């Protein structure tokens, strides 16, 4: 079963949390995670089983907002669990030595103890201020894990950062620590001001102070947010400009339509007036012709009546001349 898990994990490309920044100088997944944990209330929300999914989803959105899109909710939960487990292991080291949790922040620090602590938890300096308000006294690493979550082996391997299992690490740590305490090597003391630049594990982890990391990450996030705001503002301006141009085009089309409608109405009025004028002219012409025709008929009837009375034709033509009627148009 263990070999199957290892083979499936080996076939999956693991991306370290402290080496996946997008672009030069961008924040890594670890930078975003630590900044999220530093925000008051975030870890308390994640600590609740009922709200853990929502908290991890918020952190996932924060990662995607910084261009990191290869993390998952299960991977985030696994990474936080392992960081807490490493932190508890480091606290146990300090507890066995009778030292407080903030021992590494003191002026004189034993380099051997510091090396063991940072080997158990490379992020100890960043996590100690975050977990300072949480009471882990009386709880071992195993007890805390049993009360709050269970370990997974396949889907959560994405967030492991090539870490070994914490059980074997704890065993090796205790053996090395016990032999280190019994050795006769001298204590090497140094100031914590130089510890800021110390690199543990072949350059894989650079320990930085919390304020500097927070300020740097916040500057990067503010710059990213400003860029997004500028892009949104440009998009709004372009949309408003296109909208104004469309409204002008619509107004121009409406004006042209009204002009064409006015021209058509004027044309129809002219046609109606011309038709009415022609109708009246034709009516007058018809009445005039009817009158002329009636006059001719009356003249012919009168001539015929005179002829019946044996009036001479010359007298009839002189009184009622037909030539005058025939010459009229």
Image (cartoon, rainbow, N blue to C red):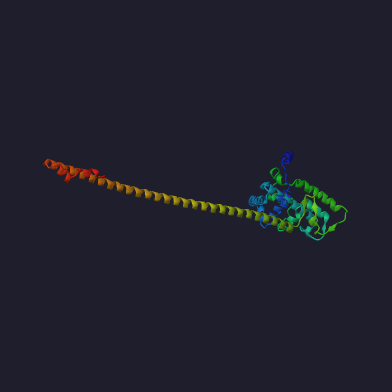
- The image quadrant where one finds the N terminus is top right
Q: Is residue 294 above or below residue 125?
A: above
Q: Position of residue 268 (x, y in %)?
A: 38, 49
Q: Is residue 188 above or below residue 9?
A: below
Task: Count the numbered circles shown.
Answer: 0
**Position in image of residue 17 (x %, y %):** 72, 49
Residue 302 in view of the camera: no
Which residue occupies the extreme front position in the image?
314
Front in this rendered view, residue 110 or 97 = 110
How far across and down, in percent of the image, does residue 218 sit? 69, 57
Residue 158 seen from this side = yes
Q: Residue at x 63, y 53 (%)?
A: 231
Q: Looking at this view, is 176 or 138 the one in front? A: 176
Residue, far left: 309
Residue at 51% x, 51% y is 249
- The quadrant the C terminus occupies is top left
Tell which of 218 and 289 is nearer to you.
Answer: 289
Q: Position of residue 292 (x, y in %)?
A: 23, 45
Q: Is residue 305 above or below residue 249?
A: above
Q: Nearer the viewer, residue 110 or 49?
A: 110
């Amino acid at each position: 079963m263990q070999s199957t898990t290892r083979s499936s994990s080996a076939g999956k490309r693991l991306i370290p949390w402290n080496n996946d920044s997008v672009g030069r100088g961008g924040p890594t997944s670890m930078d975003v995670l630590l900044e999220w944990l530093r925000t008051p209330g975030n870890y308390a929300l994640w600590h609740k089983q009922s709200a853990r999914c929502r908290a991890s989803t918020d952190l996932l959105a924060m990662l995607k907002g910084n261009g990191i899109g290869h993390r998952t909710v299960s991977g985030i939960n696994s990474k936080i669990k392992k960081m807490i487990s490493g932190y508890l292991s480091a606290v146990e080291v300090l507890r066995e030595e009778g030292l407080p949790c903030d021992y590494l922040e003191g002026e004189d620090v034993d380099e051997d103890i510091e090396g063991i602590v940072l080997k158990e938890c490379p992020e100890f300096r960043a996590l100690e201020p975050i977990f300072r308000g949480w009471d882990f006294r009386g709880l071992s690493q195993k007890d805390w894990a049993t009360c709050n979550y269970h370990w997974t082996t396949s889907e959560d391997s994405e967030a492991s950062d090539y870490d070994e299992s914490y059980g074997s690490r704890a065993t090796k740590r205790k053996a090395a620590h016990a032999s280190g305490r019994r050795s006769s090597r001298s204590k090497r003391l140094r100031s914590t001001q130089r510890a800021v630049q110390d690199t543990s594990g072949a350059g894989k982890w650079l320990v930085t102070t919390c304020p500097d990391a927070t300020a740097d990450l916040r500057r990067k996030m503010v710059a990213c947010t400003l860029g997004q705001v500028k892009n949104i503002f440009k998009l709004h301006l372009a949309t408003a400009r296109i909208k104004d141009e469309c409204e002008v085009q619509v107004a121009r089309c409406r004006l042209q339509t009204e002009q064409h409608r006015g021209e058509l109405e004027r044309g129809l009025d002219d046609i109606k007036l011309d038709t009415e004028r022609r109708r009246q002219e034709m009516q007058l012409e018809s009445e005039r012709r009817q009158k002329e025709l009636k006059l001719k008929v009356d003249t012919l009837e009168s001539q015929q009546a005179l002829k019946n009375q044996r009036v001479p034709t010359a007298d009839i033509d002189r009184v009622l001349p037909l030539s005058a009627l025939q010459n009229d148009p």
